[in-house]
């Protein structure tokens, strides 16, 4: 571990009680408590579309389970927490993810994607980017490697998304956005100027539009991430549609399931068998982010 201040902070957490707001368990995993739920982090790799090397991880908030089968905590608490409580939960999750990511000594240069829940678009009135920046400064963790990932929006939320993106950008964070279509991705590229755009692989269904988006994003130094790649057929379709040298990133159950422990660089693509398909289908409902 190269972050001495973080190491000292984690050492203090080891002496915290499991009934407290934040503590380390016997596995060294940072865990938090909210609404009587014990929550922690799971990570899924984001890989290069060319050689499948890991370039980043996305963090998910999960209820604690020793076998990495925890549930999506936001789905559990969506109808319980109000807007103010959602802001508090978001801050707790960001801290948990930061602790659990950097305590595992990830390779230098790997990015960490942290999602901003859709409720926070309306709840953000203060300078929440500044609050998170102060936490990172205290722990001496480089904020340049963290990408704050904004959620899908409705047309009425366009101005809110722009406001929140600028808020985080002013505090030195890189910005990621989600798009439901290739056309929306193009609009976000022009309007928000993000560092990354995520799009569901199912929406990448028009090769000319996909190639155009990748070329424009390459010029704008924005990463396009195709997510929910669950089988080799989807990956092959993506590769065949991209007949240019424009780079892109990939993410999905074909490569990695979300886990508490960061995976290694090596990846062996599973054979397209019914067993693999059944495993993905059974796990997807619980682990999808």
Image: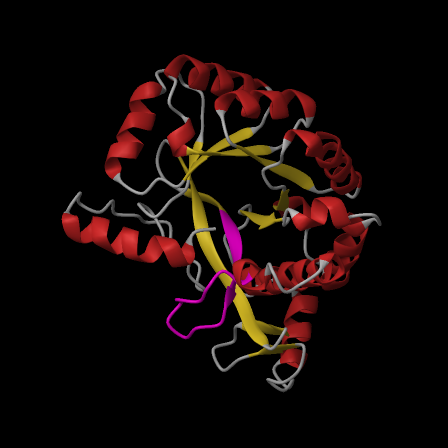
Display colour scheme: secondary structure
Quadrant of the image occupied by residue 46: top left
Q: Is residue 88 left or right of residue 278?
A: right
Asked if one can make out residue 263 in the rendered structure from this viewpoint, the answer is no
For residue 60: magenta? yes
Return the x and y of residue 227 as percentages of the image width and height: 43, 39
Foreground pick, 18 / 30: 18
Foreground pick, 118 / 46: 118
* 105 versus 273 height, above or below: below
Return the x and y of residue 266 as percentages of the image width and height: 32, 49
Q: Residue at x 43, y 73 (%)?
A: 65
- How many callouts does the rendering have? 0
Quadrant of the image occupied by residue 80: bottom right
Q: Residue at x 45, y 20 (%)?
A: 246
Asked if one can make out residue 146 in the rendered structure from this viewpoint, the answer is yes
> In which quadrant is the N terminus drawn?
bottom right
For residue 244: magenta? no
Furthest toward the right, the residue is 126
Return the x and y of residue 253 as percentages of the image width and height: 34, 48
* 44 versus 184 height, above or below: below
Q: Residue at x 29, y 33 (%)?
A: 234
Furthest toward the front, the residue is 79
Return the x and y of residue 68 as percentages of the image width and height: 40, 67
Q: Residue at x 47, y 77 (%)?
A: 27
Foreground pick, 35 / 131: 35
* 130 versus 217 height, above or below: below
Q: Which residues are magenta?
A: 57-73
């Amino acid at each position: 571990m190269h972050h001495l201040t973080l190491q000292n902070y984690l050492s203090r957490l080891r002496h915290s009680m499991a009934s407290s707001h934040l503590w380390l368990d016997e596995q060294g995993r940072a865990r938090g408590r909210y609404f009587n739920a014990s929550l922690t982090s799971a990570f899924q790799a984001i890989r290069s579309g060319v050689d499948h090397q890991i370039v980043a991880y996305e963090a998910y908030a999960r209820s604690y389970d020793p076998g990495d089968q925890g549930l999506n905590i936001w789905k559990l608490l969506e109808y319980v927490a109000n807007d103010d409580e959602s802001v508090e939960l978001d801050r707790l999750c960001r801290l948990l993810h930061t602790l659990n990511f950097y305590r595992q000594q990830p390779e230098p240069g790997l990015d960490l994607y942290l999602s901003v829940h859709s409720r926070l678009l309306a709840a953000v009135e203060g300078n929440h980017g500044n609050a998170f920046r102060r936490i990172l400064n205290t722990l001496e963790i480089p904020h340049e490697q963290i990408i704050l990932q904004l959620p899908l929006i409705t047309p009425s939320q366009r101005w809110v998304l722009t406001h929140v993106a600028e808020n985080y950008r002013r505090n030195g964070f890189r910005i990621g956005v989600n798009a439901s279509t290739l056309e929306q991705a193009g609009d976000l590229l022009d309007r928000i100027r993000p560092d990354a755009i995520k799009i569901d692989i199912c929406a990448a269904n028009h090769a000319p539009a996909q190639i155009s988006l990748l070329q424009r994003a390459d010029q704008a130094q924005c990463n396009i991430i195709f997510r929910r790649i669950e089988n080799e057929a989807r990956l092959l379709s993506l590769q065949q549609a991209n007949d240019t040298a424009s780079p892109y990133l990939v993410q999905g159950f074909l490569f990695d399931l979300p886990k508490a422990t960061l995976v290694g660089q090596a990846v062996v693509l599973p054979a397209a068998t019914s067993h693999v398909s059944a495993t993905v289908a059974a796990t997807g409902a619980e682990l999808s982010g």
